[in-house]
Amino acid sequence: MKACFMGLGYIGLPTAIISSQHGINVCGVDINPKVVEKTNKGELHIVEPGLQDLLKKAVDSKSLVASTTPFESDVYLIVVPTPFKAKHEPDISYVESATKAVIPLLKEGDLFIIESTSPVGTTEKMAELIFAERPELKGRIHIAYCPERVLPGNVIFELVNNDRVIGGIDDASADAAAEFYGKFVTGQLHKTNCRTAEMCKLVENSSRDVQIAFANELSMICEKAGINVWELISLANKHPRVNILQPGCGVGGHCIAVDPYFISSAFPNEAKIIAQARSINNYKSEWCVEKAKNAILSFELENGKKPQVALMGLAFKPNIDDLRESPAMKIAKYLVAEMPDVKFNIVEPNISSHPDFDIVDFQTAFEQSDIVVYLTAHKQFFTLPQEANDKLILDFCGVIKK
Ligand code: SAJ
């Protein structure tokens, strides 16, 4: 079997590598020639634990070849980004152009799968596009939508072990796609139609966004009420049917802070909680900026000098080096730009340098600063003193549990 992966990013590349280990000849396609060149040299262009070795083996054994144009295959997978445009409307132009690139190669019996997070109706739209150009293939190829749900940092395990939702444009398409994923997925494969599968992906991330918004709202209420929100949540979670998530300085990454907009922009009158959760989680970052600014100004008033301020953590979640769409990063950039006279000690233990900031060691930053602002709960920070008489500690992510 030959499979062609359109898109060699954070999901396409690992999936291409894993499927190439299971007797599938894989062609990985990317429009970026540098990505193709690196991949063909066996060099990983993304950060994912354990993947480098697997890529090297796949390239050495020639079960994976990268290219800027697709090869004729039996299965085509679309794994390209779906960013959003102004007003938070999804931009499916990459899905469209990847689909157009494979249309001339399609033949009877082929399987065409979209994995990219997509607004509801995208798979049917792409089917129309295919049949408009190749009407003879109607009823003769299989088309399905099969979202991924892996957690960055644990991709190799989750790609194989997570259950998957397989949405066909008809039953035969769902069966064909399930047979394909059955070659390398040991989790259960749940068959449905393509619209349900598209919505399922959006709903999974929206559900998490709404739950985080609840925690973030509680954190702002508790601050006014003089209650420690982390103690409160841990006590409420002792109830057998309550499971509140953790507040933070906002929601980052490419998925949870994006996918809910695909629902709210398509269903503006109905998607009330989903839209509100997005606003709360975005507002939480502004709230953190205000708290930090007020603390800095109060210090200056009381001490007649500007404080040194440690900004602890830039990554979008704990214990990773991924700064993409990170609320901590946005807060740091904003404070540095707004308060040019303040000395900020910027800490990110998972990176050694950054083009915009001097990165300071976490212990030095803690010791030298008058105000310590925890933005990302990296494990290193839990080794620092939980309190200090000569410092004000602002904890936005639960490093100080007491
Ligand atoms: N966060 C909180 N409080 C929490 C949990 C998370 O503030 O209690 C924040 C994190 O700090 C981070 C953001 O949420 O800024 C997102 O982090 P995450 O670990 O919840 O999720 P991602 O973005 O790394 O991956 C998500 C996963 N989706 C779900 O858990 C429902 C993953 O399974 C998906 O595959 C991925 O999105 C995706 O590609 O859609």
Image (cartoon, rainbow, N blue to C red):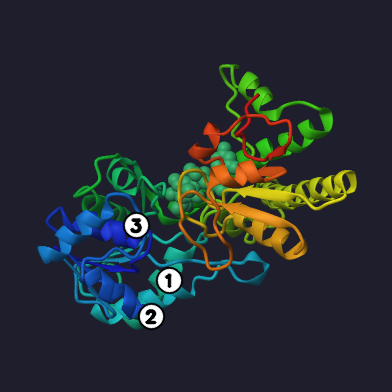
Q: Name the residue under label 3.
A: 170
Q: Name the N-terminal-most of marks 2 and 1.
A: 1
Q: Does the residue labelled 2 lie within 8 Å of ligand 1?
A: no
* Element type at mark 3: loop
* Element type at mark 1: helix
In the picture, the disc for residue 158 is: none
Q: Name the N-terminal-most of marks 2 and 3.
A: 2
Q: In this view, does 238 lie above or below 343?
A: above
In the picture, the disc for residue 132 is: 2
Three-letter residue code for mark 3: Asp
Mark 3 vs mark 1: in front: 1
Q: Nearer the viewer, residue 270 or 47?
A: 47
The picture places residue 386, in percent across and down from the top left corner, at 63, 29
Three-letter residue code for mark 2: Ala
If the image is split into quadrants, where does the C terminus sit? top right
Q: In this view, does 241 lie to the left or right of 1?
A: right
Residues packed near mark 1 inside 10 Å, few (<14), some (14 to 19) or many (20 plus):
many
Q: Name the residue under label 1.
A: 95
The picture places residue 197, in percent across and down from the top left corner, at 43, 51
Residues packed near mark 2 inside 10 Å, few (<14), some (14 to 19) or many (20 plus):
few
Q: In this view, does 286 lie to the left or right of 42?
A: right
- Whole-number angstrom distance, CA of label 2 to CA of label 1: 16 Å
- Residue at (44% x, 74% y) in the render: 94
